[in-house]
Structures are given as C-alpha cells and as structure tokens.
C-alpha cells in the first residue's frame, strides 16, 4: 500500500507497505547532483556524499559503522547527475536505528577540515580508479563532449583541480543552499512499516529544517555531435557511440525500453549476437539509456582491437539502419516485452528497489507510478512505436563518438559515416 505525506516545511514522505517481508529500506533523496554544480566546483555533490559519513556532533565515522553493523544492516549513498541519496536497509525491528543514523548524518555532519583533507585523497584515488577502468572512463569522456559547457556533461566525481579547491566553507555552504532545501528532499521508505509512525519520526528531524524556496534553474543542453579520440596505450579500443535520447517522462519512454532491449540491452540483442556471437569482434558490447528530467542519451559501448574498430562500427551502424528502416517482427517485440516485465517483477522483490522506484516516481512525476501502470505501458508498445522512435533518434546528424585507446581519428570517422 502506497501513502504520501507532505510535511509543513515541504519535505515529502512516501512509503510503500510490504507486510510479508522482514526488511525495511529508507532513503533520503535530494534533488541535487552534479548537474547543479558550477564548473569550478564540479564534484562537490559527490564530495558531500562522502563527508556525511565522516562524523557528526555525536558520532564518529567508526560509531556510524559500528551501529549499523550491530543490527546487521547496510548504510550507503550514491551521487547522480540529478539527485543524491543516502539510504539504509535493516530489519523492521531496527527501523529506529536506521532513521536515527540517517537523520544524524544528514543534519549534523561536522565537515571537519581534517576529514576533508583525508577524504580528498580518497576521491583522488576514486578518480584514478575510473581512469584505469576504460569501459567506465569512456562514458565520462563521451558525456563531456556530447553536452559541452553544460553541467549535465560534467563528470560526477569532478576533476583533480576542482576537488583540490574545495574547502570547508565551500562544501558547507553548498550543502546548506543545495541540499538542506526541504522542497528538494524526499524521504522514501519501503518494507514492513507503519506510515504514520515514519511521518512522526521524520517530523522530529528533517521536518524541522527551515523551509526555503527552491530556486533551482537548469538549462537544457543541446547535444553536440562530434568525434573525439583520446590516445592511450591500451590493448583495446573503447568506443562510446550515442545519439539524443528521451527524458524520464517522455510519452515514448516505454517504446525506448523495448528499443534498447532489442538493440543491445540483453544477450539475445542484435548487437550482442552480431558483434560478439557471430563475428567474435568484442567481449563486451551493449546499448543503454540515460534519461534525465528534460533530455537523454541512447548510447552504445563496445571494446575491440584497433584493427577491428571499423568492422565493429559498420555492424553497429547497420543494425541502427535496420531498426530505422524496417519494422521489427511481432515475435521480437513480445520477447523484449517479456524480458522487461520479468526484470521489473524480479526487482520488485527487493525493498531497496521499491524504495528507489518510489523516490524516482516522486522526483520525476511528482506521484507514485503503480507497477500495474508500468506493465500496461510496456504492453501497449507496438512495432510502429519502436520504428518511429528509431527514425526519430537514429539520424546521422545526432550521433557522437568517443574513442579511447590506440586508434586514429580517421578510422573511427569512416565508421561513423556508415549510417
């Protein structure tokens, strides 16, 4: 059962009671992420995510770890481009522990200068780890050039230079103005729970944060088609090809899920079967959707040898052309739908996933999207819908390509012109 309460300061509390489980997952979701940052402070949202676990007025970082471990629970956080969330999962009997811990780190973190310096080094290592993981690093490279000079293209972790300039006053100031905004805060809870009890607990903590206007203004970026090659001594060439996608609330979002599954979202997808299984040109090849409040990306990743770059791009472009020019078979449509339905239903067995789905529904739609409505949306997709979306998105002028490894720009350029 779903319930929603808006506190007097504007904080939203959304819950879904699942009486047959023993766990409860709670998250504090804030509509602030790397997209809200200026260029000279890129990475500050992620830095704050780290700092909230480094000690409060009454708990050290070790105290926080010991308390959640003592009840067998999990506490963590993540930063995205449009939101940051802090969450915990415990047995229902330990719900008070989770609420107390999350509320304390969110409201009472000290941002100690000593801890800031130590965590700065940790984040440097995290950035290096991504740079040493080329199949991840190429995604950041692609985003930066696809959305140039717009914060949506900023790397979530930031850059060495911007991280080095973050001081306690800047971090604490950004947290106060961008995170402690009740109108941006959603408390999402799923599991064995009582809604009214949760509301009373949140009233005593986040509900006491002073209300303030949400002056968040985001500029919608225009995709910038280009080819960018970063030379690096690697055994493979890592390719990220992308076109404009759709927003989280786009009316064709269900058709996009189906299109992605058919193109490269599964082991039976066209890209996986053609590039890997039939031709043996890559170990990893897939497509993905990145959707935001007002725009999106449909991307394709492949890792291959420098000698096979053009062959891989030719196959990818050929599959894109087929989807644009030829209607898919009804049997392929039904298989894709069944896969999506299965993924959705399996994920609904986790209180973590249901808590996240609650929050994202509130973030992007301002309401709860019932599972039945989502499944019905998938069922309503037609072959004509999928082809129409492919025709809208798979146009030569929308595509960008980023390549990382030992490859020449002219080689990737020839492949990109194949559409």
Image (cartoon, helix red, strand yellow):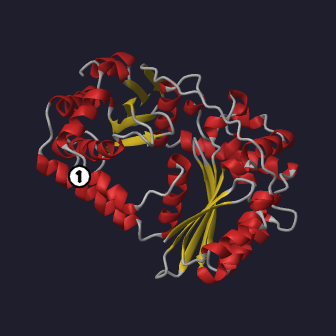
Quarter that holds the C terminus = top left
Q: Would residue 96 appear left or right of 239 to someone viewing this image? A: right
Q: Is residue 237 visible?
A: no
Residue under the image location 69 percent in, 48 percent down: 183
Q: Which secondary structure lies at badge 1?
A: helix
Residue 219's x, y, as percent? 59, 27
68 versus 415 height, above or below: below
Query: Who's the residue at 50% across and 43% down the image?
Result: 133
Residue to which mark 1 is pinned: 336
Camera-side residue of 349 and 125: 349
Relative to residue 257, is residue 126 drawn left or right? right
Q: Position of residue 108 (x, y in %)?
A: 83, 59
Residue 211 drawn above or below residue 156: below
Q: Position of residue 249 (x, y in %)?
A: 44, 42
Using residue 166 as the reference point, say whether residue 33 is left or right of it: left
Picture coordinates of residue 236, whole percent (x, y): 38, 36
Write the residue at 66% across / 72% down: 198
Whether residue 206 is visible to the viewer of this picture, yes or no, is yes
In the rendered view, does 140 fall on the left or right side of 376?
right
Q: Which image quadrant for residue 35?
A: top right
The image shows residue 275, relative to residue 14, as above or below, that is above
- For the residue pair 341 and 397, the one nearer the viewer reads as 341
């Amino acid at each position: 059962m779903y319930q929603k309460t808006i506190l007097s300061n504007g904080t939203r509390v959304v819950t879904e009671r699942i009486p047959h489980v023993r766990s409860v997952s709670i998250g504090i979701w804030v509509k602030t992420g790397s997209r809200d940052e200026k260029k000279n402070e890129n990475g500050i949202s992620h830095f704050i995510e780290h700092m909230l676990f480094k000690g409060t007025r009454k708990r050290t970082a070790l105290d926080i770890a010991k308390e959640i471990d003592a009840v067998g629970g999990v506490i963590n956080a993540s930063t995205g481009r449009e939101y940051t969330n802090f969450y915990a999962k415990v047995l229902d009997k330990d719900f008070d522990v989770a609420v107390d811990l999350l509320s304390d780190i969110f409201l009472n973190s000290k941002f100690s200068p000593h801890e800031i310096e130590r965590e700065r080094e940790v984040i440097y290592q995290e950035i290096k780890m991504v740079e040493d993981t080329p199949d991840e690093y190429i995604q950041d490279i692609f985003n930066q050039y696809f959305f140039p000079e717009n914060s949506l293209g900023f790397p979530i972790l930031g850059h060495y230079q911007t991280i080095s300039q973050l001081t306690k006053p800047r971090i604490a100031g950004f947290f106060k103005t961008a995170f402690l905004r009740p109108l941006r805060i959603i408390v999402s809870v799923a599991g064995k729970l009582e809604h009214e009890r949760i509301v009373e607990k949140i009233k005593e903590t986040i509900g006491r944060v002073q209300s303030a206007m949400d002056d968040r203004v985001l500029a919608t970026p225009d995709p910038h088609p280009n080819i960018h090659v970063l030379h690096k001594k690697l055994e493979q060439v890592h390719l990220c090809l992308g076109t404009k996608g759709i927003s989280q609330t786009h009316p064709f979002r269900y058709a996009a899920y189906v299109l992605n599954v058919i193109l490269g979202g599964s082991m039976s997808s066209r890209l996986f079967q053609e590039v890997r299984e039939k031709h043996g040109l890559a170990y990893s090849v897939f497509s993905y959707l990145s959707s935001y409040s007002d725009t999106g990306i449909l991307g394709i990743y492949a890792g291959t040898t420098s000698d096979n770059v053009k062959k891989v791009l030719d196959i990818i472009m050929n599959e894109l052309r087929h989807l644009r020019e030829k209607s898919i078979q009804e049997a392929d449509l039904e298989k894709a739908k069944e896969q999506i339905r299965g993924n959705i239903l399996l994920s609904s067995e986790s209180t973590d996933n249901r808590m996240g789905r609650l929050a994202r529904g509130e973030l992007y739609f301002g309401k709860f999207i019932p599972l039945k409505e989502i499944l019905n949306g998938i069922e309503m997709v037609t072959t004509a819908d999928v082809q129409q979306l492919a025709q809208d998105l798979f146009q030569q002028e929308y595509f960008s390509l980023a390549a990382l490894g030992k490859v020449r720009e002219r080689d990737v350029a020839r492949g990109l012109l194949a559409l």
